[in-house]
Amino acid sequence: MIKHKLGFGWRSVWVGLAGVVGSGGAASWEPLAQDHVVIYESPDPDNLYAYSPGLCLAPNGDLVATIDLGGPAGKDLAGPLYTYTRTGRTGSWQGRAYVSSDGGESWDMTGQFPWMHERPFVAGESIYILG
């Protein structure tokens, strides 16, 4: 049986054990275990955030991970975007899917979509992603 936990922070999304560390109200994410694989790491973590991870084990043994990207630099992402305006502010986000066929050792981006809070799940022999 393969067991994985998907950790995340504003800077990156990784497979492994994750935890919150910080003091005085300031929190940051860092792995509790050093044996982890980074799926995505923001090139500009102050302006492009990675969040809302999902993880699913496919019937064929592949792992499927999903994340959201957003923040001030979200408007500059290549691919489909959802753009919104709320309380006078405009922002954009994008969902992404990644697949690993080697138990989480390496990951390939396989999809980009203009929605967020997506979750991969298995129904029968198929994988679906709803957001």
Image (cartoon, rainbow, N blue to C red):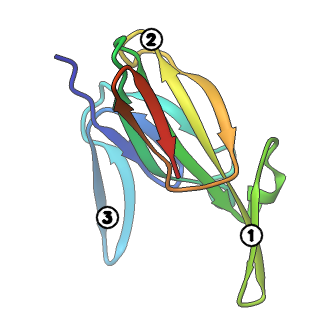
Residue lying at 45% horizontally and 11% vertically, measured from the top left:
101
User: Which mark is nearer the camera, 1 or 3?
Assistant: 1
Residue lying at 16% horizontally and 16% vertically, measured from the top left:
1
Residue lying at 41% horizontally and 43% vertically, measured from the top left:
54
Q: Which residue is mark 1?
A: 91
Q: Amino acid at mark 3?
A: Gly
In the image, residue 71 sits, relative to residue 94, either above or below, namely below
Q: Earlier in the sequence, mark 1 or mark 3?
A: 3
Label 2 and label 1: CA atoms lie apart by 34 Å
Question: Quadrant of residue 120 in the image?
Answer: top left
Label 1 and label 3: CA atoms lie apart by 28 Å
Under circle 3, the secondary element is strand
Residue 105 image offset from top left, x and y in percent: 42, 15
Residue 125 image offset from top left, x and y in percent: 37, 19
Q: Which residue is mark 2?
A: 101
Q: Amino acid at mark 2?
A: Ser
Local packing at callout 3 (Cα closer than 10 Å; few below 14, some 14-19, many 20+) is few
Q: Earlier in the sequence, mark 2 or mark 3?
A: 3
Under circle 1, the secondary element is strand
Local packing at callout 2 (Cα closer than 10 Å; few below 14, some 14-19, many 20+) is some
Label disc, if present, on residue 22 of the rendered structure? 3
In the image, residue 68 sits, relative to residue 16, either above or below, namely below
The reply, left or right, for residue 47 in relation to residue 35 is: right
Question: Quadrant of residue 64 in the image?
Answer: top left
Question: Quadrant of residue 15 in the image?
Answer: top left
The reply, left or right, for residue 14 in relation to residue 109 is: left
46 or 127, nearer to the observer: 127
